[in-house]
Image (cartoon, rainbow, N blue to C red):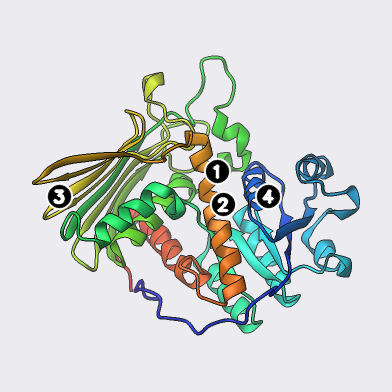
Amino acid sequence: MGLSDTAAAPRQPTVGAGRRLRGALVGAGSIASYHMAAWRAIEDVEIVAIADPIHSRAAALAVESGIGDGHLYDGHLSLLEAEAEDLDFVDIATVPPLHREQVEAAADCGVHVLCQKPFAFELADAEFMARHCAERGVRCIVNENWRWRSWYRRVKELVDAGAVGTPHYAAFTCHRDMVLPQADGELPQLLTRQPYTREMSQLIILEWGIHLMDVLRFLLGPVDSVRASTRTISPLVRGEDVALVELAFAAGATGLIDISWASRIRPERRLIRGNVDPFLLEGDAGSIELDAQSGDVLYLNTGEGTAAEPAHPGLTPAEAYQRSFEACQRNFVRCLREGRHSENEADDNLQTLALALATYEAAAGGRAVALQ
């Protein structure tokens, strides 16, 4: 599978013309509350049911949206078999090992799919889901919300307008304390909020780095090759918690992703959820910097001087984080209604996943891996 830009796809049939779309949430874990809040903000859409094997978890989420107990299900199959729900789509917010079964079942029922990232842990599973949905005439779009953050959309506008000339370098450098043992003996917040991460054999790249790779693909286009090194520092996790990734883009730019969840840092340097990730993009005529330590400011530096603007004007970091879910989910609805291809359609997200998995191959082999 090549990592070239997705060709223009034919228009799909429109969904729900003249009426509200009916959707259901599959999975009521920690990320689901963000999904549900976003659905409540989107007009002409209603989440009518929730499926989760832990009834209390589903019930707690249902209260927020006025969903009655009769619309709670213990699994995706019982939900999909309930004809009374009359679903247009499902929002799958479960862990990746469950995605293939759930996406396949939804497609077999003719129900469109929005699926949480990572799409899968194995490329073959992701390819199967994309192909199966296409064969069933069902849309499958990946809920990769990072590229929908307002500051990355703004960076894209500036790059496309030629504000920095031809980009040649982009870098994320983000070191945090997310998985190290705590002084009080309690588990770090990440491992409490997402306990499955403790046993993931592939961790920081698939949980965080994949977001950053998708952003760089969004900004700079296809990737030709990747080099990487990884390591595990914390005794509390199985997978890598430190990664250094170098991307060679087809257009000639170099990308660097330098990330850690196992760095002892000063409390004031810890980025709360929703903040901007420190980012720098350089071109032959200027640079763009996202400064996460001085109020989340976007700087445009050129020969004429420096211009500054807030990364998320009028919003708190938490509100900005939530808005990225809303933007991604609103795009999903718009694509269903208008029958147009989405930039984060499954066929495009396959390329981000292939890149993330190639990063592990590069780290294990100590060599550059080409993306065919």
Give the residue type that dot 3 points to.
Answer: Gly
Lower sequence index among marks 1 and 4: 4
The image shows residue 30, relative to residue 47, as above or below, that is: above
Left or right: where 8 falls relative to 13: left
Q: Quadrant of residue 125?
A: bottom right
Q: Is residue 19 visible?
A: yes
Lower sequence index among marks 2 and 3: 3
Is label 1 in contact with label 2 (beta carbons under 8 Å)? Answer: yes
Q: Depth check: 348 or 145 in front? A: 145
Q: Quadrant of residue 22?
A: bottom right
Lower sequence index among marks 3 and 4: 4
Distance between mark 2 and mark 3 Cα atoms: 32 Å
Q: Quadrant of residue 17?
A: bottom right
Q: On the rendered image, what quadrant is the N terminus found in?
A: bottom left
Question: Picture coordinates of residue 219 (x, y %)?
Answer: 32, 59
Number of residues whose C-alpha sits closer than 10 Å to that of mark 3, classed few (under 14), some (14–19) or many (20 or more): many
Give the residue type that dot 1 points to.
Answer: Gln
Q: In the structure shown, which secondary structural element does the residue marked by tag 1 occupy?
A: helix
Residue drawn at point x = 11 percent, y = 55 percent = 284
Q: Which residue is mark 3?
A: 286
Lower sequence index among marks 3 and 1: 3
Q: On the rendered image, what quadrant is the C terminus found in?
A: bottom left
Q: Depth check: 43 or 100 in front? A: 43
Give the residue type that dot 4 points to.
Answer: Arg
Lower sequence index among marks 2 and 4: 4
Q: In the structure shown, which secondary structural element does the residue marked by tag 4 occupy?
A: helix
Q: Which residue is mark 2?
A: 326
Q: In the structure shown, which secondary structural element does the residue marked by tag 2 occupy?
A: helix
Q: Which residue is mark 1?
A: 322
Give the residue type that dot 2 points to.
Answer: Glu
